[in-house]
Amino acid sequence: PDRIDWPGAYLEKAIDIAEPLGSAIVLIHSHPGGLFAFSAPDDASDTVVMPCLFEACGDIHGSAVMTPDGAIRARLYDRSLTATPVQLVSVAGHDILYFWESQARDPRRARRPMAFTSGMTAELARLCATFIGVSGTGSIAAEQAARLGFGRNQYIEFDKVEAKNLNRILNATLDDAKTGRPKAEMLAAAVATYRGPDVAFAITREIGTREAVLAASQSDVLFCCVDTLEARQFADLVASVFVIPLFDVGVTIPTRRTPDGGAAIADVCGRIDYVQPGGSTLQDRGVYSPETLRAEYLAKADPDAHRAEVEAGYIKGLAEEAPSVITLNMRAAAACMNEFVARAYPFRLDPNENYARTMFSLAACDEDFFAESTFPAAPNPVFARGDQEPLLGLPILGRRRKEAA
Protein backbone atom coordinates (compact mmCIF):
# COMPACT_ATOMS: atom_id res chain seq x y z
CA PRO A 1 0.00 0.00 0.00
CA ASP A 2 2.88 2.43 0.44
CA ARG A 3 5.45 1.45 -2.22
CA ILE A 4 5.82 0.06 -5.71
CA ASP A 5 8.68 -2.08 -7.01
CA TRP A 6 9.37 -3.28 -10.55
CA PRO A 7 10.99 -6.73 -10.88
CA GLY A 8 14.38 -6.39 -12.55
CA ALA A 9 13.68 -9.32 -14.87
CA TYR A 10 10.57 -7.53 -16.21
CA LEU A 11 12.51 -4.33 -16.87
CA GLU A 12 15.32 -6.21 -18.60
CA LYS A 13 12.84 -7.98 -20.86
CA ALA A 14 11.20 -4.66 -21.76
CA ILE A 15 14.59 -3.10 -22.49
CA ASP A 16 15.57 -6.04 -24.72
CA ILE A 17 12.42 -5.43 -26.79
CA ALA A 18 12.57 -1.62 -26.84
CA GLU A 19 16.29 -1.04 -27.45
CA PRO A 20 16.62 -2.30 -31.04
CA LEU A 21 13.40 -0.52 -32.04
CA GLY A 22 14.06 2.78 -30.30
CA SER A 23 10.74 2.37 -28.48
CA ALA A 24 9.52 3.98 -25.28
CA ILE A 25 8.74 1.91 -22.18
CA VAL A 26 5.65 2.79 -20.14
CA LEU A 27 5.28 1.36 -16.63
CA ILE A 28 1.60 0.97 -15.73
CA HIS A 29 0.10 -0.20 -12.44
CA SER A 30 -3.32 -0.19 -10.77
CA HIS A 31 -4.75 1.97 -8.01
CA PRO A 32 -7.44 -0.36 -6.64
CA GLY A 33 -8.54 2.29 -4.14
CA GLY A 34 -9.54 4.62 -6.97
CA LEU A 35 -6.89 7.34 -6.60
CA PHE A 36 -6.66 8.90 -10.06
CA ALA A 37 -3.36 10.63 -9.51
CA PHE A 38 0.30 9.82 -9.13
CA SER A 39 1.01 9.24 -5.44
CA ALA A 40 4.19 10.05 -3.54
CA PRO A 41 5.26 6.37 -3.71
CA ASP A 42 4.67 6.50 -7.48
CA ASP A 43 6.91 9.56 -7.76
CA ALA A 44 9.58 7.90 -5.63
CA SER A 45 9.47 4.75 -7.74
CA ASP A 46 9.80 6.69 -11.00
CA THR A 47 12.76 8.61 -9.57
CA VAL A 48 14.58 5.32 -9.14
CA VAL A 49 13.44 3.41 -12.22
CA MET A 50 13.45 6.05 -14.97
CA PRO A 51 17.22 6.76 -14.83
CA CYS A 52 17.81 3.02 -15.21
CA LEU A 53 15.66 2.92 -18.34
CA PHE A 54 17.40 5.93 -19.86
CA GLU A 55 20.76 4.40 -19.04
CA ALA A 56 19.77 1.43 -21.19
CA CYS A 57 18.01 3.09 -24.14
CA GLY A 58 15.61 5.69 -25.43
CA ASP A 59 14.89 9.39 -25.08
CA ILE A 60 11.30 9.14 -23.78
CA HIS A 61 9.76 6.76 -21.26
CA GLY A 62 6.60 6.95 -19.21
CA SER A 63 4.47 5.77 -16.33
CA ALA A 64 0.72 5.34 -15.96
CA VAL A 65 -1.93 4.43 -13.40
CA MET A 66 -5.28 2.73 -13.91
CA THR A 67 -8.34 2.80 -11.63
CA PRO A 68 -11.14 0.20 -11.34
CA ASP A 69 -13.45 2.23 -13.61
CA GLY A 70 -11.00 1.65 -16.48
CA ALA A 71 -9.61 5.16 -16.53
CA ILE A 72 -5.90 5.58 -17.33
CA ARG A 73 -3.69 8.57 -16.57
CA ALA A 74 -0.17 8.76 -17.98
CA ARG A 75 2.92 10.94 -18.03
CA LEU A 76 6.10 10.96 -20.11
CA TYR A 77 9.67 11.64 -18.97
CA ASP A 78 12.60 13.00 -20.95
CA ARG A 79 16.24 12.41 -20.05
CA SER A 80 16.23 15.34 -17.62
CA LEU A 81 13.41 13.49 -15.80
CA THR A 82 10.97 16.30 -16.54
CA ALA A 83 7.46 14.83 -16.57
CA THR A 84 4.86 15.89 -19.14
CA PRO A 85 1.22 14.78 -18.69
CA VAL A 86 -0.34 12.82 -21.56
CA GLN A 87 -3.33 14.94 -22.60
CA LEU A 88 -5.46 12.05 -23.91
CA VAL A 89 -5.53 8.31 -23.34
CA SER A 90 -7.92 6.55 -25.71
CA VAL A 91 -9.12 2.97 -25.31
CA ALA A 92 -10.72 1.39 -28.37
CA GLY A 93 -12.64 -1.77 -27.54
CA HIS A 94 -16.31 -2.55 -28.15
CA ASP A 95 -16.80 0.99 -26.84
CA ILE A 96 -14.36 3.83 -27.53
CA LEU A 97 -13.27 5.60 -24.35
CA TYR A 98 -11.39 8.88 -23.96
CA PHE A 99 -9.66 9.94 -20.74
CA TRP A 100 -8.54 13.57 -20.73
CA GLU A 101 -5.86 14.99 -18.45
CA SER A 102 -7.92 18.16 -18.13
CA GLN A 103 -10.75 16.14 -16.57
CA ALA A 104 -8.57 14.03 -14.26
CA ARG A 105 -10.01 15.60 -11.10
CA ASP A 106 -13.60 15.08 -12.22
CA PRO A 107 -15.08 12.08 -10.33
CA ARG A 108 -17.28 11.46 -13.38
CA ARG A 109 -14.27 11.13 -15.68
CA ALA A 110 -15.30 7.64 -16.88
CA ARG A 111 -18.81 8.81 -17.76
CA ARG A 112 -19.15 9.44 -21.48
CA PRO A 113 -20.94 12.55 -22.81
CA MET A 114 -24.47 11.83 -23.97
CA ALA A 115 -24.83 11.12 -27.69
CA PHE A 116 -26.17 13.89 -29.94
CA THR A 117 -25.63 16.62 -27.33
CA SER A 118 -23.41 19.68 -27.05
CA GLY A 119 -21.20 17.63 -24.73
CA MET A 120 -20.47 15.24 -27.59
CA THR A 121 -19.76 18.18 -29.90
CA ALA A 122 -17.36 19.71 -27.41
CA GLU A 123 -15.33 16.51 -27.17
CA LEU A 124 -15.31 15.92 -30.94
CA ALA A 125 -13.75 19.36 -31.30
CA ARG A 126 -10.63 17.88 -29.66
CA LEU A 127 -10.40 14.84 -31.96
CA CYS A 128 -9.01 14.15 -35.43
CA ALA A 129 -10.89 12.08 -38.04
CA THR A 130 -9.27 10.88 -41.26
CA PHE A 131 -11.31 9.87 -44.30
CA ILE A 132 -9.73 7.54 -46.80
CA GLY A 133 -11.68 8.30 -49.96
CA VAL A 134 -14.07 11.26 -50.26
CA SER A 135 -16.08 10.36 -53.32
CA GLY A 136 -19.56 8.78 -53.15
CA THR A 137 -19.97 7.60 -49.56
CA GLY A 138 -16.83 9.41 -48.42
CA SER A 139 -17.96 12.94 -49.23
CA ILE A 140 -21.21 12.34 -47.36
CA ALA A 141 -19.57 10.80 -44.29
CA ALA A 142 -16.96 13.57 -44.24
CA GLU A 143 -19.66 16.24 -44.47
CA GLN A 144 -21.45 14.67 -41.51
CA ALA A 145 -18.24 14.53 -39.46
CA ALA A 146 -17.41 18.17 -40.14
CA ARG A 147 -20.90 19.27 -39.08
CA LEU A 148 -20.83 17.00 -36.03
CA GLY A 149 -17.83 19.01 -34.93
CA PHE A 150 -14.56 17.06 -35.34
CA GLY A 151 -11.75 19.51 -34.66
CA ARG A 152 -9.48 18.21 -37.39
CA ASN A 153 -10.69 16.51 -40.56
CA GLN A 154 -8.20 14.93 -42.99
CA TYR A 155 -9.17 13.83 -46.49
CA ILE A 156 -6.92 11.30 -48.23
CA GLU A 157 -7.98 11.24 -51.87
CA PHE A 158 -5.87 11.47 -55.02
CA ASP A 159 -8.70 11.61 -57.58
CA LYS A 160 -10.14 14.70 -59.26
CA VAL A 161 -13.72 15.85 -59.78
CA GLU A 162 -15.29 14.84 -63.09
CA ALA A 163 -18.69 15.67 -64.57
CA LYS A 164 -19.85 12.10 -63.99
CA ASN A 165 -19.28 12.58 -60.22
CA LEU A 166 -21.59 15.55 -59.79
CA ASN A 167 -24.69 13.50 -59.06
CA ARG A 168 -23.21 11.87 -55.95
CA ILE A 169 -20.33 13.94 -54.47
CA LEU A 170 -21.47 16.59 -52.02
CA ASN A 171 -20.22 20.16 -52.57
CA ALA A 172 -18.83 19.37 -56.05
CA THR A 173 -19.66 21.99 -58.71
CA LEU A 174 -19.56 22.35 -62.48
CA ASP A 175 -16.47 24.53 -62.15
CA ASP A 176 -14.74 21.83 -60.10
CA ALA A 177 -15.45 19.31 -62.87
CA LYS A 178 -14.29 21.67 -65.62
CA THR A 179 -10.99 22.42 -63.88
CA GLY A 180 -10.43 18.88 -62.60
CA ARG A 181 -10.13 20.08 -59.03
CA PRO A 182 -8.86 17.47 -56.56
CA LYS A 183 -11.79 16.05 -54.59
CA ALA A 184 -9.96 16.44 -51.30
CA GLU A 185 -9.24 20.13 -51.93
CA MET A 186 -12.82 20.75 -53.03
CA LEU A 187 -14.22 19.23 -49.84
CA ALA A 188 -11.72 21.00 -47.56
CA ALA A 189 -12.60 24.35 -49.13
CA ALA A 190 -16.33 23.66 -48.71
CA VAL A 191 -15.91 22.79 -45.02
CA ALA A 192 -13.95 26.01 -44.46
CA THR A 193 -17.00 28.03 -45.56
CA TYR A 194 -18.96 26.94 -42.49
CA ARG A 195 -16.29 25.76 -40.02
CA GLY A 196 -13.59 28.32 -40.72
CA PRO A 197 -9.86 27.74 -41.36
CA ASP A 198 -7.60 25.03 -39.93
CA VAL A 199 -10.35 22.42 -39.60
CA ALA A 200 -10.25 20.50 -42.90
CA PHE A 201 -7.06 19.38 -44.61
CA ALA A 202 -6.60 17.88 -48.08
CA ILE A 203 -4.04 15.12 -48.59
CA THR A 204 -4.00 14.57 -52.34
CA ARG A 205 -2.23 11.24 -52.26
CA GLU A 206 -3.19 7.60 -52.53
CA ILE A 207 -3.45 5.86 -49.17
CA GLY A 208 -0.67 3.55 -50.33
CA THR A 209 1.90 6.35 -50.12
CA ARG A 210 4.21 7.22 -47.26
CA GLU A 211 2.81 10.76 -46.92
CA ALA A 212 -0.77 9.52 -46.62
CA VAL A 213 0.10 6.76 -44.13
CA LEU A 214 1.96 9.18 -41.86
CA ALA A 215 -0.95 11.62 -41.95
CA ALA A 216 -3.47 8.87 -41.17
CA SER A 217 -1.29 7.63 -38.29
CA GLN A 218 -2.01 10.84 -36.36
CA SER A 219 -5.77 10.24 -36.30
CA ASP A 220 -8.09 9.38 -33.44
CA VAL A 221 -10.44 7.51 -35.79
CA LEU A 222 -10.30 6.28 -39.40
CA PHE A 223 -13.17 6.13 -41.89
CA CYS A 224 -12.57 4.02 -45.00
CA CYS A 225 -14.90 4.95 -47.87
CA VAL A 226 -13.20 3.49 -50.94
CA ASP A 227 -14.18 1.19 -53.78
CA THR A 228 -10.96 -0.80 -54.21
CA LEU A 229 -9.69 -3.74 -52.19
CA GLU A 230 -6.11 -2.47 -52.24
CA ALA A 231 -7.11 0.79 -50.52
CA ARG A 232 -9.08 -1.19 -47.92
CA GLN A 233 -6.01 -3.31 -47.24
CA PHE A 234 -3.95 -0.18 -46.56
CA ALA A 235 -6.65 1.22 -44.26
CA ASP A 236 -6.71 -2.12 -42.44
CA LEU A 237 -2.93 -2.04 -42.01
CA VAL A 238 -2.87 1.56 -40.74
CA ALA A 239 -5.54 0.73 -38.15
CA SER A 240 -3.61 -2.33 -36.93
CA VAL A 241 -0.15 -0.80 -36.97
CA PHE A 242 -1.06 2.46 -35.23
CA VAL A 243 -3.85 1.03 -33.02
CA ILE A 244 -6.62 3.28 -34.38
CA PRO A 245 -10.32 2.30 -34.56
CA LEU A 246 -11.52 1.89 -38.16
CA PHE A 247 -14.98 2.19 -39.70
CA ASP A 248 -15.31 0.74 -43.20
CA VAL A 249 -18.35 1.29 -45.43
CA GLY A 250 -19.25 -0.27 -48.75
CA VAL A 251 -22.29 -0.41 -51.03
CA THR A 252 -23.22 -2.56 -54.00
CA ILE A 253 -26.14 -3.17 -56.34
CA PRO A 254 -25.96 -6.71 -57.74
CA THR A 255 -28.02 -7.43 -60.84
CA ARG A 256 -29.57 -10.53 -62.36
CA ARG A 257 -30.40 -11.57 -65.88
CA THR A 258 -34.04 -11.55 -66.91
CA PRO A 259 -35.58 -14.21 -69.17
CA ASP A 260 -35.59 -11.79 -72.11
CA GLY A 261 -31.83 -11.23 -71.79
CA GLY A 262 -32.07 -7.91 -69.97
CA ALA A 263 -30.90 -6.94 -66.50
CA ALA A 264 -32.81 -6.31 -63.28
CA ILE A 265 -31.87 -5.27 -59.75
CA ALA A 266 -31.19 -8.31 -57.56
CA ASP A 267 -30.50 -6.34 -54.37
CA VAL A 268 -29.39 -2.97 -53.02
CA CYS A 269 -26.89 -3.56 -50.23
CA GLY A 270 -24.71 -1.75 -47.74
CA ARG A 271 -22.09 -2.94 -45.24
CA ILE A 272 -20.52 -1.20 -42.25
CA ASP A 273 -17.63 -2.82 -40.36
CA TYR A 274 -16.19 -1.55 -37.09
CA VAL A 275 -12.62 -2.82 -36.71
CA GLN A 276 -11.23 -2.47 -33.20
CA PRO A 277 -7.46 -2.63 -32.76
CA GLY A 278 -6.36 -6.12 -31.80
CA GLY A 279 -9.61 -7.72 -32.97
CA SER A 280 -10.57 -9.24 -36.30
CA THR A 281 -9.36 -7.28 -39.32
CA LEU A 282 -11.13 -6.65 -42.61
CA GLN A 283 -9.04 -9.47 -44.05
CA ASP A 284 -10.16 -11.80 -41.26
CA ARG A 285 -13.74 -10.92 -42.14
CA GLY A 286 -13.29 -11.76 -45.81
CA VAL A 287 -13.63 -8.20 -47.13
CA TYR A 288 -10.48 -8.90 -49.13
CA SER A 289 -8.02 -11.75 -49.50
CA PRO A 290 -4.70 -12.33 -51.26
CA GLU A 291 -6.63 -13.89 -54.14
CA THR A 292 -9.04 -10.99 -54.58
CA LEU A 293 -6.23 -8.45 -54.24
CA ARG A 294 -4.31 -10.27 -56.97
CA ALA A 295 -7.37 -10.40 -59.21
CA GLU A 296 -7.96 -6.67 -58.72
CA TYR A 297 -4.35 -5.90 -59.57
CA LEU A 298 -4.41 -8.06 -62.68
CA ALA A 299 -7.66 -6.49 -63.80
CA LYS A 300 -6.06 -3.06 -63.44
CA ALA A 301 -2.81 -4.07 -65.13
CA ASP A 302 -4.37 -6.07 -67.98
CA PRO A 303 -8.06 -5.20 -68.27
CA ASP A 304 -8.54 -6.94 -71.62
CA ALA A 305 -7.44 -10.30 -70.24
CA HIS A 306 -9.74 -10.02 -67.26
CA ARG A 307 -12.66 -8.06 -68.61
CA ALA A 308 -15.03 -10.98 -68.19
CA GLU A 309 -14.06 -11.34 -64.51
CA VAL A 310 -14.28 -7.68 -63.55
CA GLU A 311 -17.56 -6.34 -62.26
CA ALA A 312 -18.16 -2.68 -63.05
CA GLY A 313 -18.65 0.09 -60.53
CA TYR A 314 -21.56 0.30 -58.15
CA ILE A 315 -23.97 -1.75 -60.23
CA LYS A 316 -22.47 -5.18 -60.62
CA GLY A 317 -22.86 -6.61 -64.10
CA LEU A 318 -23.96 -3.31 -65.63
CA ALA A 319 -21.57 -0.57 -66.74
CA GLU A 320 -22.74 2.86 -65.55
CA GLU A 321 -20.55 5.94 -65.80
CA ALA A 322 -22.77 8.09 -63.56
CA PRO A 323 -24.96 5.82 -61.46
CA SER A 324 -27.76 7.52 -59.51
CA VAL A 325 -26.78 6.10 -56.14
CA ILE A 326 -26.67 9.09 -53.83
CA THR A 327 -29.67 7.82 -51.85
CA LEU A 328 -27.92 4.51 -51.20
CA ASN A 329 -24.67 6.30 -50.39
CA MET A 330 -26.44 8.57 -47.90
CA ARG A 331 -28.05 5.60 -46.18
CA ALA A 332 -24.70 3.81 -45.84
CA ALA A 333 -22.68 6.90 -44.86
CA ALA A 334 -25.17 7.82 -42.14
CA ALA A 335 -25.07 4.26 -40.79
CA CYS A 336 -21.27 4.43 -40.72
CA MET A 337 -21.18 7.73 -38.82
CA ASN A 338 -23.90 6.59 -36.42
CA GLU A 339 -21.81 3.48 -35.72
CA PHE A 340 -18.98 5.71 -34.56
CA VAL A 341 -21.36 7.73 -32.37
CA ALA A 342 -22.73 4.51 -30.86
CA ARG A 343 -19.21 3.35 -29.99
CA ALA A 344 -17.90 6.62 -28.54
CA TYR A 345 -21.17 7.80 -26.98
CA PRO A 346 -23.13 4.58 -26.35
CA PHE A 347 -26.88 4.79 -26.88
CA ARG A 348 -27.85 1.29 -28.07
CA LEU A 349 -30.14 -0.88 -25.99
CA ASP A 350 -27.87 -3.90 -26.64
CA PRO A 351 -24.08 -4.14 -26.09
CA ASN A 352 -21.93 -2.74 -28.88
CA GLU A 353 -20.02 -6.02 -29.16
CA ASN A 354 -23.03 -7.41 -31.06
CA TYR A 355 -22.50 -4.97 -33.94
CA ALA A 356 -19.03 -5.54 -35.36
CA ARG A 357 -20.67 -5.67 -38.79
CA THR A 358 -24.00 -4.31 -40.02
CA MET A 359 -25.41 -5.30 -43.39
CA PHE A 360 -28.61 -3.92 -44.86
CA SER A 361 -30.70 -4.78 -47.89
CA LEU A 362 -33.01 -2.09 -49.23
CA ALA A 363 -34.59 -4.59 -51.61
CA ALA A 364 -35.54 -6.96 -48.78
CA CYS A 365 -36.07 -4.18 -46.19
CA ASP A 366 -33.76 -6.18 -43.96
CA GLU A 367 -30.83 -5.47 -41.62
CA ASP A 368 -28.45 -8.04 -40.16
CA PHE A 369 -25.88 -7.70 -37.40
CA PHE A 370 -22.77 -9.74 -36.63
CA ALA A 371 -20.94 -9.81 -33.30
CA GLU A 372 -17.17 -9.52 -32.95
CA SER A 373 -17.13 -13.16 -31.79
CA THR A 374 -18.52 -14.16 -35.20
CA PHE A 375 -15.18 -13.50 -36.87
CA PRO A 376 -11.93 -15.37 -36.26
CA ALA A 377 -8.92 -13.18 -35.54
CA ALA A 378 -5.76 -14.53 -37.14
CA PRO A 379 -2.35 -13.68 -35.65
CA ASN A 380 -1.52 -10.11 -36.65
CA PRO A 381 2.25 -9.66 -37.04
CA VAL A 382 2.02 -5.89 -37.60
CA PHE A 383 -0.31 -5.09 -34.69
CA ALA A 384 0.93 -2.06 -32.70
CA ARG A 385 4.09 -1.93 -34.83
CA GLY A 386 3.95 1.88 -34.81
CA ASP A 387 6.28 3.86 -37.05
CA GLN A 388 8.97 1.22 -37.28
CA GLU A 389 10.66 1.19 -40.65
CA PRO A 390 9.57 0.23 -43.17
CA LEU A 391 6.11 1.70 -42.54
CA LEU A 392 3.36 -0.91 -42.25
CA GLY A 393 6.07 -3.54 -42.71
CA LEU A 394 6.08 -2.81 -46.47
CA PRO A 395 9.45 -2.10 -48.13
CA ILE A 396 7.77 0.14 -50.71
CA LEU A 397 6.87 2.55 -47.87
CA GLY A 398 10.33 2.58 -46.32
CA ARG A 399 12.15 5.83 -45.65
CA ARG A 400 14.04 7.02 -48.69
CA ARG A 401 17.79 7.37 -48.37
CA LYS A 402 17.68 11.15 -48.50
CA GLU A 403 15.07 11.22 -45.70
CA ALA A 404 17.12 8.81 -43.58
CA ALA A 405 20.19 10.99 -43.98
Image (cartoon, helix red, strand yellow):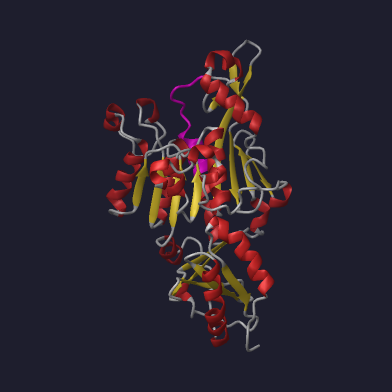
> Residue at the location (59% across, 21% down)?
264
Question: Where does residue 55 sit, x and y in percent of width and height?
Answer: 53, 70
Give whichever of 218, 361 is nearer the camera: 218
190 lies left or right of 214: left
Displayed quadrant of residue 283: top right
> Residue at the location (40% across, 35% down)?
158
119 lies left or right of 374: left
The residue lying furthest to the front in this view is 55
Q: How many marks?
A: 0
Give whichever of 363, 216 is nearer the camera: 216
Question: Where does residue 155 sit, x and y in percent of width and height?
Answer: 40, 44
> Residue at the location (61% across, 27% down)?
294
Question: Where does residue 220 sit, x and y in percent of width and height?
Answer: 48, 56
Residue 320 seen in the figure: yes
Task: Identify whether 312 is placed above or below 16.
Answer: above
Displayed quadrant of residue 9: bottom right
Residue 316 seen in the figure: no
**Quarter of the figure that contains the N terminus:** bottom right
Question: Where does residue 332 sit, x and y in percent of width and height?
Answer: 53, 41
Give whichever of 25, 54 is nearer the camera: 54
Magenta stretch encompasses residue 326: yes
Displayed quadrant of residue 262: top right
348 lies left or right of 142: right
Magenta stretch encompasses residue 330: yes
The residue lying furthest to the bottom in this view is 2
Task: Identify whether 49 is placed above or below 328.
Answer: below
Task: Identify whether 169 is placed above or below 20.
Answer: above
> Residue at the location (32% across, 39% down)?
186
Start and end of the magenta stretch?
A: 319-335
